[in-house]
Image: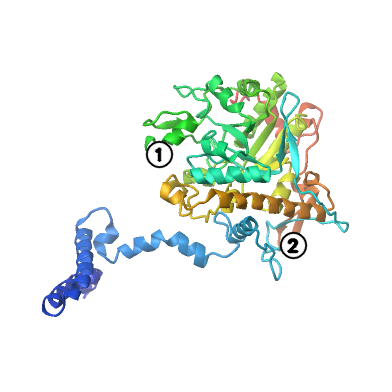
Amino acid sequence: MRDLNELTRFTTFAGVAVLTLVSFVLMLVWSWWFVIPLAVFAVLTGMGVYDVTQTHHSILRNYPVLGHMRFFFEGIRPEIRQYLIESDQDEEPFSRDHRSLVYQRAKGQEDARPFGTRARVYDAGYSWVTHSVRPVHIEDCDFRTTIGGSACKKPYSASLYNISAMSFGSLSANAILALNTGAKLGGFAHDTGEGSVSRYHKAGGGDLIYQLASGYFGARAADGSFDPEKFKATATLDQVKMIELKLSQGAKPGHGGMLPASKITPEIAEARGVPMGIDCVSPAAHPAFSTPIEMMEFIGQLRELSGGKPVGFKLCIGHRREFMCMVKAMLETGITPDFIVVDGAEGGTGAAPVEFSNHVGMPMIEGLTFVHNTLRGAGLRDEVKVGAAGKIVSAFDIARALALGADWCNSARGFMFAIGCIQAQACHTNHCPVGVATQDPLRMRALDPDHKSQRVARFHKNTMEALGEMTGAAGLDHPNGFLPYHLMLRQGDKSMAEGNDVYEYLPEGYLLDPKAEDHRGNKLRWERARAETFDRVD
């Protein structure tokens, strides 16, 4: 009996083999129309023969033909979950509620919700903005902040909401063109990502933030080192408004990368300044500097080569002491960046090792609060503007970041949704179904840059108007007035806390005052930090 039960594993295989024979006989004695089922069952029988003889998949060897159903359903599992199973509030990584909000604002559709909130307002983690009984009506929602310190000759008036770093190569040509044209229409900035300035950025005509990462694309010598003259040629383009030195990104901090030769097209090679047919390596660390002081001197060099444009850096906070090393180098050299962009561990990427995405890097809120308070403690906060990036798609996301110390916000995936991204999470496969994250010409042609650029500009405009309404509801006349006490946070079923108690602004200059009280162990880290080295000094 046991042997009989074991043989049932081959029932499907035996069945298609028998049906192949039956179809063949019926074709000969009855009708040639049976050639169709004969062909189908013959293919399945051949598949079964292969399954029982191959050695790579145990499931197929034990369950020939039938075992393929397992791989089929595994392949469509993400789509089944997204469309049929997950709730509107499940964040994997963005909830349907958030995606729908972006789609509606990008299309200019009604974004109101009937019947009240679906958020669990009594669950831990829920947060809200406090409102005033004397709300303010704001007419002009083109909110801006001026970026550029005392050493900057060409400060930039930036929108409070801009497109975060996404490279040409990671995104398609049509996606880059749609994003940049939308930025031009809406009057906000577009970060190039580390892939440098491509012909599609230039064609859009929008303001650019030129990101310089460890691969020095657009400013790269033949040996991969930094080339000052090539950098100058790119950085002095009228379209480039700021320079961003990338130290790390939230989704994979401390991780380098390689663009295989097979993926380098002539257009990508042109933008990045790399040869065809050779793997292009981005090291994990910058070759141009190795100490905090050298880093500040490099920032000073970039500012001079760019003609005095704002220069800053982007990072995800790791060792907090290392950031303090940078701040000490600012004080010692007198060279300060014009801005710092804080990315969070929740940030996006085309592809990253799971361990890095899940377990390396500080989340944006904690990283932003730390950077803001460290600059305050060193007396540099007024000199350096701070940007925030990491799952910022709604007006509340922006208001919260501003309240916690940011001067402006960037979003990558929010604007990807605006041009049609459906969160298929196939960015690394070159098979993006909507033509956003692919270099396949047939797939990218589905994305019409003219139409999608209008959606980009509309999403930005409607989000800024929503921010204006939220700002007015809080009794403020500009979003830069948000402070931690405008936030409330649910800590448990029966407790809530004011943002000022959880994310308080620490005193100006306290890190420099030996008599000042320590806060959260920051003075101990400050004492261990050195401008001369990133190494820990006990």
Q: Is 249 situated left or right of 43 in this image?
A: right
Q: Secondary structure at mark 2?
A: loop
Real-space Cα separation, disc 1 to disc 2, in angstroms = 54 Å
Q: Residue 288, image x and y in percent?
A: 54, 22
* Tag 2 residue: 494
Q: Quadrant of residue 329?
A: top right
Could you tell me which residue is drawn at 53 percent across and 47 percent down?
A: 358
Q: Is residue 500 left or right of residue 80?
A: right
Closer to us: 63 or 102: 102
Residue 140 sits above or below residue 249 on the image: below
Q: Quadrant of the N terminus?
A: bottom left
Q: Is 526 left, or right, of 164 in this rendering?
A: right
* Image quarter of residue 204: top right
Q: Nearer the viewer, mark 1 or mark 2?
A: 1
Check the image and name the residue furthest to the right: 134
Dot 2 crowding, Cα within 10 Å, few <14, some 14–19, many 20+: few
Name the amino acid, label 2: Lys
Q: Can I make out residue 517 in this image?
A: yes
Q: Quadrant of residue 244?
A: top right
What colouring does the structure picture have?
A: rainbow
Can you say whether 381 is above or below 537 in the image? below
x%, y% of residue 202?
A: 56, 36
Dot 1: element: helix
Of the pair 475 and 241, the residue shown nearer to us = 241
Please name whichever residue, 368 or 468, is drawn nearer the observer in this view of the structure: 468
Q: Which mark is residue 129?
A: none
Q: Which residue is mark 1?
A: 263
Task: Give the answer, above or below, for where 34 lies relative to 213.
Answer: below
Q: Give the mark nearer the N terminus: 1 vs 2.
A: 1
Asked whether residue 7 is in view, the answer is no
Residue at 64%, 34% in the rendered image: 320
